[in-house]
Amino acid sequence: MSNRRNFFLALIYGLWGLIAAALGLPAAAYLLLPPRARKEPEWVEAGSLAQLQTGVPEQVVFRRNRVDGWKVSSEKTSVWVLKKADNQVLAFAPQCTHLGCGYHWDEQKRHFLCPCHSSTFSIDGAVLSGPAPRPLDRYLVKLDGQKLWLGPAGKPAEPSA
């Protein structure tokens, strides 16, 4: 009878040990190992320069992958793109820097206008008026032939000279 009792005690303690290891090893790895470093910023193809008019801001819609934890989702987003005469390109994030409303280009007045609180921005993204605290956020831009590539957003536009 003692052998049977010792066998079941050993079995129970063994199962407890397995459960503790199954729960404890991932927790220890999370607490003790440093997180993986992020890769280089992801560049996304946003379109072709041939489709853009020089000197006129245009809203361009493109797809990008967004990583949220383990989930990767493809989403449509937009950007305001300005092709300058010297083949330089500026790309502005589509949200106003005041409260994140979507703004639009007013062709008659030649500036960007946010309809929520009437902030206005120049063609190069500088604040002209309104409650917006800073210039429009810009995407990093890279050109590969006629292809337009966008990097991370967040760099505010420089004030106009």
Image (cartoon, rainbow, N blue to C red):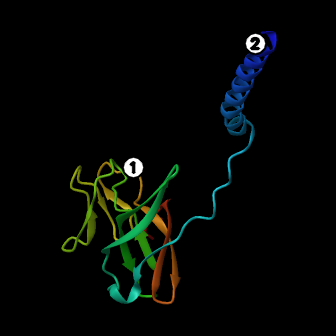
Say which residue appears at 34% left-offset and 62% top-offset: 94
Query: Identity of the amino acid at label 1?
Result: Pro
Say which residue appears at 34% left-offset and 51% top-offset: 132
* 23 left or right of 131 in image: right
Disc 1 marks which residue? 133
Specify the farthest residue to the front. Answer: 1
Where is residue 71? Give x, y as percent.
Answer: 47, 53
Q: Give the position of the N terminus as an image quadrant.
A: top right
Tell me, yes or no, if residue 5 can be seen here. Answer: yes
User: How many numbered discs sit on the rendered protein?
Assistant: 2
Sequence-earlier tag: 2 or 1:
2
Q: Nearer the viewer, residue 96 or 51?
A: 51
Residue mark closest to the camera, 2 vs 1 = 2
Q: Nearer the viewer, residue 80 or 74?
A: 74
Residue 29, above or below 122: above
Q: Nearer the viewer, residue 146 or 113?
A: 146
Disc 2 marks which residue? 5
Where is residue 40? Give x, y as percent.
Answer: 62, 64
Query: Identity of the amino acid at label 2?
Result: Arg
Q: Nearer the viewer, residue 55 or 62?
A: 62
Residue 101, above or below 76: above
Specify the farthest residue to the left. Answer: 108
Residue 160 lies in what quarter of the image? bottom left
* 92 left or right of 67 in image: left
CA distance separating discs 2 and 1 = 75 Å
Categorize mark 2 by other alpha carbons within 10 Å: few (<14), some (14-19), many (20+). few
Say which residue appears at 23% left-offset and 54% top-offset: 118
- For the residue labelled by badge 2, is the local secondary structure a helix, a strand or a loop? helix
- For the residue labelled by badge 1, is the local secondary structure a helix, a strand or a loop? loop
